[in-house]
Image (spheres, rainbow, N blue to C red):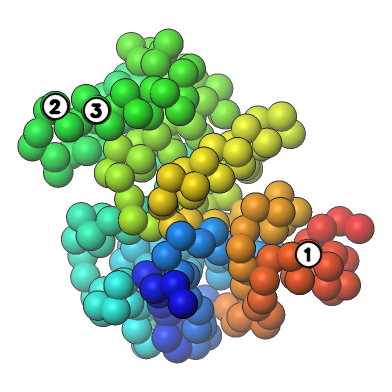
Amino acid sequence: MSEVVLELKNVETRYGQIYALRGINFQVKKGEIVALLGANGAGKSTTLKTISSLVPASAGQVLFMGQEITHEQPHSIVEMGVIHVPEGRMIFKELTVRENLELGSFTLKDNVERNRRMEKVFDKFPVLKERHKQMGGFLSGGEQQMLAIGRAMMTEPKVLMLDEPSMGLAPILVQTIMEIIRQINDEGTTVLLVEQNAKAALKMADRGYVLETGEIVMEGDASVLSQDESIVKAYLGE
């Protein structure tokens, strides 16, 4: 049985008096791609922010490799290897592509290792190598998403959490981004994926969870969820 790398136990998160997450439980095992599905406002982004400690959990536990990280500082969670690529990419538009990537390895003291990681990113995203001197703000939406993922890869994450990586992208670019996520997973990185394109997410994922108003209402193998009538009607547009 695969090792559980990330686990939420009865996690509740509130914004003031409003509950965003209501006692959710789930696991992500080593080497998996796990998809989090749900409508806008279901609590998907809040789940990732709670794991990252960007939004504090009001109850429950977040565990990484069996160690509780519920109340750790965000930078400590990054240093452990849990990396969050937020919705909207959040690149630094006034910095060059190379400078954005270098920020992904800010904890690294070894320049040789930093350059090795950057070449690895450039191998996966040749367009970033071509534009390494260009300001991030001048990249297209798809290129900015590649830069956000590339910056996360500079940390060599154990768990990569992606929030809506296909949002706003043309279908051909969605396919490219999904293929890259699959490659990253094949190379050994565990992935937790929040994705509006449920069909693409379930096609790629091993397992999935469905959130509704802050509660998990369904879970299972991705292949089973993709055939579930309620999932098909609600999220797959059929």
Determine the secondary structure under disc 1: loop
Residue 172 left/right relative to 160: right
User: Type of residue at label 1?
Assistant: Ser
Disc ID at residue 116: 3
Can residue 135 be seen?
no
Q: How many marks?
A: 3
As rendered, which of 184 and 133 lies closer to the eye? 184
The Cα atoms of the two marked residues, 1 and 3, are separated by: 39 Å
Determine the secondary structure under disc 2: helix
Disc ID at residue 226: 1
Residue closest to the far left: 109
User: Type of residue at label 2?
Assistant: Val
Q: Position of residue 113 (x, y in %)?
A: 17, 32
Q: Position of residue 152 (x, y in %)?
A: 36, 42
Crowding near pointer 1: few (<14 within 10 Å), some, many (20+)?
many
Identify the residue at horizontal 65%, vertical 65% (top origin).
37
**Which residue is disc 2 drawn over?**
112
Q: Position of residue 134 (x, y in %)?
A: 38, 13
Identify the residue at horizontal 34%, vertical 83% (top origin).
61
The Cα atoms of the two marked residues, 3 and 2, are separated by: 6 Å
The Cα atoms of the two marked residues, 2 and 1, are separated by: 44 Å
Q: Residue 211's quadrant in the figure?
A: bottom right
Crowding near pointer 2: few (<14 within 10 Å), some, many (20+)?
few
